[in-house]
Amino acid sequence: MSQRMFNLVAGLLFGLFALVHAVRIATSSGFMVAGWSLPTWASTIAILAGAYLALAALRLNKSAGS
């Protein structure tokens, strides 16, 4: 797998990760792991981290093409 393809796939996956957490907050859906409920503030952090990582990967993809 080339570096450009890796960056594109990573960017899209991190973007999807952030989108899923945004939808979770918008719909007030719960998320349980082994009987433990994930708090909304954790999803907010996950949105910020996922969006940052997606943008960074896509920027790297753009610069790798030059």
Image (cartoon, helix red, strand yellow):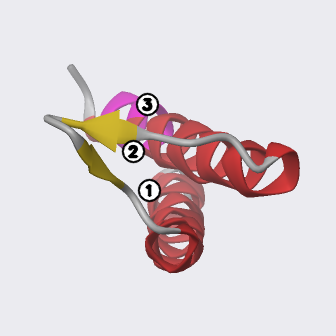
Q: Is residue 22 above or below residue 41?
A: above
66 vs 60, nearest the viewer: 60
Secondary structure beneath dot 3 equals: helix
Instruction: Residue 8: say if magenta.
Output: yes
Q: Which residue does the image show at 49% across and 71% down from the upper left?
A: 56
Secondary structure beneath dot 1 equals: helix
Query: Do tag 2 and tag 3 residues touch (Cβ < 8 Å)?
Result: yes
In the rendered structure, the answer to whether residue 6 lies left or right of residue 52 reads left
Is the stretch drawn in magenta largely helix, strand or loop? Answer: helix
Query: Do tag 2 and tag 1 residues touch (Cβ < 8 Å)?
Result: yes
Q: Is residue 66 above or below residue 30?
A: below
Q: Which residue ends up furthest to the front in the rendered image?
A: 35
Q: Which residue is mark 3?
A: 9
Q: Which mark is residue 7?
A: 2
| Residue 10, image x, y percentages | 38, 41
Amino acid type, residue under disc 3 in the picture:
Val
| Residue 37, image x, y percentages | 36, 52
Compare marks 1 and 3 and give the one earlier in the sequence: 3
63 vs 47, nearest the viewer: 47
Query: Which region shows up in magenta?
Result: 4-9
| Residue 57, image x, y percentages | 45, 59
